[in-house]
Image (cartoon, helix red, strand yellow):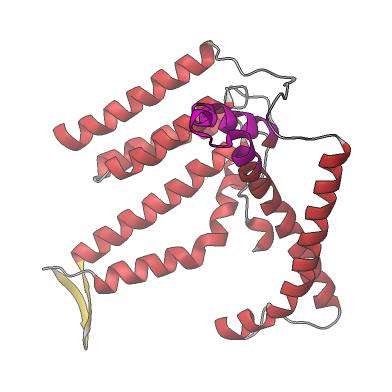
Amino acid sequence: MIRDITIGQYYPAQSKVHSLDPRTKIITSFIYIISLFISTGFNGYLATVVFLAGVITVSKVPFRFIVKGLKSIIIIIILTVSINIFFTPGVTVIFKLGGAQITLEGLIIASRMVLRLVLLIIGSSLLTLTTSPISLTDGIEALLKPLEKIKVPAHEIAMMMTIALRFIPILLEETDKIMKAQTARGADFEKGGIITRARNLIPLLVPLFISSFRRAEELAVAMEARCYRGGEGRTKLNVLEYKAGDLICYLIFILYLCVLISIRFLG
């Protein structure tokens, strides 16, 4: 389960999506998230699935690698389905047992919520999978640059967000190593119910926190050794510049958004 989490990981490849400006990918990711709340019917979700499949194909990131990240949210999906099925009132009752009932309206809403959640996770993960941490930092900093006029530390915020994303796979890898080491010493993390499993994970917290603080200190020392002093007066090796591919990407996403709006209000 730990190794199946793909949030924060970067998948290197030579594709049109990888070569896009990070600002373009950040903005279009927000457009995609907004589009999920525009889609309400079958045709809208079908258009979103087809569009997302096309983006994944162009990105050259293996679909199996992307879907692997859904295993980590399986509990959230099951909880979402259960709440919407059993607590959504409706007219058409399909199954009833005591005070609990399943309605057709509940099933429709549950299926929409699950589909929206799955599409959200898959689409959002493409941002980090196709953008290196350094490029992501530069993109976030560039987008927050106008806020510096009101004394908002754009570079520091971008750096913290990127380090947080980058540390997710590192901490997950460290957790996996600790679990294997304790399993070799006789610990069992697979048997028992949910409460028992959660209780068995408590011994992981102490070594994980110690490892996290050690890595944070090593990162701080490394940044100080390289004379890092924040964003003021800092030069960049690669200056962000919009290219023709970025303009085409914006046009494609705007067209996609217009199609969804047309499907919702005209279809």
Residue 238, percent across and down? 71, 19
Q: Is residue 150 magenta?
A: yes
Which of the 4 image quadrants contains residue 97?
A: bottom left
Q: In this view, does 28 lie above or below 182?
A: above
Which of the 4 image quadrants contains residue 132?
A: top right
Residue 259, percent across and down? 28, 28
Looking at the rendering, in which quadrant would you find the C terminus? Answer: top left
Left or right side of 263 for 224: right
Residue pictured at 51% horizontal, 25% vertical: 24
Q: Is residue 267 visible?
A: no
Residue pictured at 41% horizontal, 69% vertical: 79
Residue pictured at 78% horizontal, 82% vertical: 187
Residue pictured at 62% horizontal, 55% vertical: 5
Residue 9, percent across and down? 66, 45
Residue 113, percent across and down? 34, 56
Which of the 4 image quadrants contains residue 3?
A: bottom right
Q: What stretch is highlighted in magenta?
A: 134-159
Q: Is residue 45 magenta?
A: no
Looking at the rendering, in which quadrant would you find the N terminus? Answer: bottom right
Left or right side of 107 for 190: right
Q: Is residue 122 above or below residue 197?
A: above
Q: Quick one: which residue is furthest to the top in this view?
A: 244
Front residue (pair 78, 62): 78
Front residue (pair 101, 238): 238
